[in-house]
Amino acid sequence: MYPLDLLLDPLQYTFIRRALLVTVVASVVCAVLSCWLVLIGWSLMGDAVSHAVLPGVALSYLLGAPFAIGALIFALIAVGAIGIVRNTTAVKEDAAIGVVFTTLFAFGVVLISKFPSQIDLNHILFGNLLGVSEGDMWQVIVLGGLALAVMIVKRRDFTLFAFDRTQARAVGISPSVLSGLMLTLLALTTVVALQAVGVILVVAMLITPGATAYLLTQRFGQMLLLAPAIGIGCAIVGIYVSFYLDVSSGGTVVLAQGTVFTLAYLFSPSQGIVTRRLRRPADIVA
């Protein structure tokens, strides 16, 4: 088989084209948001929201409603509950996140155990990329496009918020409003990514591209370009690998992202472990 055939053969299937489109859209949206999440230190928040949507998805299955609706509702509930506990008690943010997301996740587990025959557990946990319908595809495109548009419009404000909240307040930007908007975007982006990789792997898409870009550059503007480029590349590689090896599509996409992060961790020009050790003898001689 020629290399061109390896690239073109999978594209003759409609389900592969849809999977590619959905994964690329989800990867780009998650990657852009991940840049700010990494800088602010909200990685655990992404983990919390991705797990807290489980009962919403389970209830949607039971009621026959689009699962995105239930997921978005419970994502917003999780974000709001974490904010309320954090702002009205002496409990620190990490503890508030832990309490809220484990409680909601446990609620989802109870629902699934109560109605196991009516809920597609594999779809919820691991996504269903190769079974994406045309309606699901447009749902991801619309929600992803909305989230990405807001991030592009507010990118300067989000960046100032991430680097210096005092300065943001000084120029008339409300940190609390931006925080709420970013958390809402986190909830929306989680719903977008759920269709691609499921509850368990969403957090990887929300963190890994931004963390990888952070290792590769010290300029935030370049991070915002590198992260989605990494996401797109890993999405394409992951789908093709899953097609030819007949393995989980969501799993291979996230595994590709983890592989790129590992390479950046080892060989990044400025921060790579191997790169710094190779430079050390030269520094000593100089």
Image (cartoon, rainbow, N blue to C red):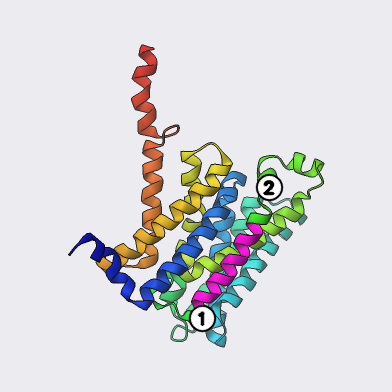
Provide residue 212's location: percent of width, then percent of height.
Answer: 46, 45
Q: Is residue 121 visible?
A: yes
Our reading of the magenta stretch's main secondary structure is helix
- What residue is disc 2 on? 156
Range shown magenta: 135-151
Q: Residue at x 41, y 60 (%)?
A: 235
The answer to which quarter of the image holds residue 17 is: bottom left
Badge 1 element? helix
For residue 53, which quarter of the picture?
bottom right
Look at the image and tell me in which quarter the C terminus lies. Answer: top left
Kindly tell me whether residue 86 is visible in this rendering: no
Q: Amino acid at mark 1?
A: Gly
Question: What is the quadrant of residue 169 in the picture?
Answer: top right
- Position of residue 4 in the picture relative to residue 116 (left or right): left
Q: Secondary structure at mark 2?
A: helix
Q: Amino acid at mark 2?
A: Arg
> Residue 135 shows which numbered tag?
1
